[in-house]
Image (cartoon, rainbow, N blue to C red):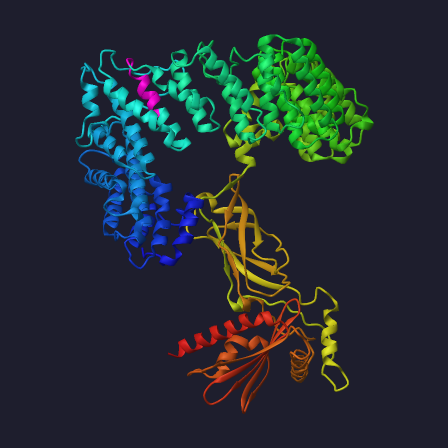
Amino acid sequence: MAAPNPEGWPQRVAAFSCSPSHFLSSTTPEDFLSDLLQDLKDDKVSESTKVLMLGPLQEHPTILCPSPQVGEQTAVALLGIFSRTAHTPKSVNLKCHLMLSIATVLISTSFVKQGVKVAEGFLDLLFQTAQDTNDQKHGGMFRPLRAIACDCLREMETCCPGLLSHKLEALYSLKQQEMTPLHQAYTLLYGVALRNAVHCLTLQKDVMDGDLKKLLASNEGFAWKATEKPLELVQLTTMSQIPVLPSNVETKELKSVVSLLLEECYLLTPVMQAALLRELTQVVSMVQSLSPAIFKSQLLRLFGTVEISLLHSTLQMKGTFTDSLFTAEDENFLLKRLVGMAQHPLLSTPQKLFYIECILHFPENRPISSNGEESLPVLVTPRMAASLFPTVFNDSSTMLSRLNILSLVYLEADEEEGIGYIFDHLMALHKIVDHHGTREMTTTFFRAVYIFMQNFYLNEKYTRDLIESLSELYRSHYTLAPNLINLVDSTQKLLEDSSWPTDLLKALQMLIVELPLQQLVHQSLQWHLKVLGRVAKEEQASQRSTVRFLLNLLINSSLCGLGDWRIGNAVLSVCRNLLQHPNLDQVFIELADLLQFMMHSFEDVDIQDHARFYYTLLTNLSKEKLSGVLNMGTGESQAKIRSLSSIMAESEELSSSLTVHRTRQPVLKLVKLSEDGISKPDHSSSGPEDSTPDVDLLKVYQNQFLNPEFASVVILKYHLTFAGEVDALYHKLFCICLHFEQTDSNYERVSDVSVPCLIYDRKPCVVSLTLKPWRPYPTVLHASAIFTTEDGLSWHTQLDPILIGFPDLFLPLPVPVHWSQGSREQLFHQLWKSLCPEESSQSATSLFCFEVGERSLREVIESSFHKYLVSKQLNPESYKVLLFLPPQFYVLLKIKNSEDAASVSIITDNWKLLPFINSYIKCITDYSADRTQ
């Protein structure tokens, strides 16, 4: 496969990054990787382009290198490119990205192993690069390369814990020597290596007294044994099982190292400090004889920090060491600070939400439970949390998080007054929603109700009032039915033993069935039926009132006569749920009457058939068989779904048949018909047989355009066919709808085109694309198609873009059919005169010259302009050509032949068309010249 033009790499990389699977549907990972590596070696490709080309390897290494062997080959190639790249300041950026790409490929393909030359060579390269402390060898211009080397070493140590455990002394020495801002990178690299080295030591058997000291002073090669069986990460959570060293191990040197790192910690950025503190926390937690009090000097600074990362590290320390490091006063102070920061006016909403989450997951010194779920710290009292009470002016997230924590506070305190405050807040939200609040406020209200029920469902006083409030809200706003159904489903799943969800459904059922028929307008009825359908699933709810309501509704209204399929479907959905109800016997007769009435009276054949089907099931099957048959419709078999019309059940399992799927590769394509197969619209009209001097031809001609639809469209014809070899699934397509999207505003919206069917082994269909230009410029249309396959599934496929060229818009002169050649030529002269720049500011003239070559001028004209030719003369040879472009633009050409070249005089009423016509004439004349050679 030939490598693409290097200039096309930005587009290829952008397409790959947008959707790797879609991009690789037209090629293979092997070919793409081969092209990429080949052009990375090309000196003609700019370094900025090469940096861009390395992006796919850094972002999706496992897609391009699916196996360790491919990863090794790729890493070898990249390492070769790295070594051949000049070591100059100009190339630093490229070398950084090459280094990062090699590390990414080796780690992602798990090829950091002993005996792998590329891995060993790359690690040596990284360490040699990192050893140039303070830029002594190559200067400050190469500092980014050292930073990347440190990052790559840290990443390899993280993925292969213990790999650098035999180089702790060398890493410590590099950290101590470095005086530039890269001191941070060296410090963190040493911290990670130290943590992993201690972890590896804890897993060894028979650890001797001097082993830790020996480990800290080691300066050997890489510990390749660490890559054979990587260690699991140590989880820093409360009560977690952390491996520890024996208490008799000498830790004097380790204590000195940790103390020095903590003393230098304040020199680092907050993010680097937090990362280092996490590493040191794990180190101290694994060494029993090392007291957590070593962190005591840092606590005062950490308690006052406003940095999220540092606070997070502080909480991790607290979860690890609890009262070994934090006193009760420390714990109380930290909680008060979290509460204060959770409402600080200068902090952003996400930051304040983080502080609330910290309170809910606060690691206590004496935790009551350790399941990791939300729980309220014992020290958080109603008085401490009073300032967090939500208001209706808070944003949704803040309001809900505050409501949640206040609910936990008052639940633990068993404070009735506080619960009343929360309920009053719910009622304030209720009023806002009742007065047509925003969608966000409506969602917030229902989430707040869920939080309230989660905590206070045993308080019957407020739960009864809440049911009444929700019922009244539904009475005024029927469109809240989905919200109420979702609330019922969620609370029922949360509170399995509570009757509140069923009581709410009963209240809504009573409200609906008692409504007078006059209030059951078409829009609200659909929501009522949704609620009744949900009520029909409740075993504890009586269904007789529902069935009587539906029968009365159909008999005493015009719904059956209107034959609305959606209403009929909604009624049948309720009936289906009733057929599966445990207490079906109680409504058997009424339900049979309802179904029988629908199958005889509802003016929709589909609804009649389904009603008859349900009636037959009801009257002929036992309850067990009936439930079994109806449940079959929600299975995986698509045939069962269709045969039993499970659409009535509104089941989620129907997503496969109701969803429009996307094809992996293009299935269809549009192939433009040849010029002979394209029919230009005939815009001619009846008129005089010939012109006379008394007739103003220009006026007669222009009067035709009083009809705005006259000569306003261009019709292009295409073959709709299959895009090469396609899967057998797509060999028979039905109900094809072609959709076109414009890329500019120069055309009226292109209408969709429908094709009944397309069979793989039959002739392609001819489709007509009707364009109505506002400005006749070349354009591109994006095309897509939705179709149905033989198994009944709907699919969406993308077609190749349709290029509309400038000559596609040419139309012959739209004059009356009986006009003679002389009349047309006379009109040409009148138009030429009227289009002179002196007459119009939009008009323009131009002159184009070209060599005719061996082909005669007549052949050039006949091949390109024969449809638009107005007149021709043989001596001297000259031609007049008129190109009409909808809606009403003209390009007039006078073409003359001379001894040396032909000249084309051009005039148009739209100067913006000149570049297009010049380009077109150049194209056809160049083509003619090429054919003669």
Drawn side of residue 226 relative to residue 319, left or right: left
Residue, far bottom? 875
Q: Is residue 573 rendered magenta in the image?
A: no
In percent of width and height, residue 791 lies at 51, 39
* Residue 423 shows up from this direction: yes
Name the residue at 74% across, 77% down. Answer: 699
In percent of width and height, residue 56 lies at 37, 45
Relative depth, front residue between 632 and 778: 778
110 relative to 906, above or below: above
Relative depth, front residue between 3 and 706: 3
Looking at the rendering, in which quadrant would you find the N terminus? Answer: bottom left
The image quarter in which residue 107 lies:
top left
In percent of width and height, residue 822 lies at 66, 85
Span of residues in magenta: 279-289
Name the residue at 76% across, 83% down. Answer: 695
Residue, far top? 414
Relative depth, front residue between 719 and 122: 122
717 relative to 534, above or below: below
Relative depth, front residue between 35 and 262: 262
70 relative to 90, above or below: above
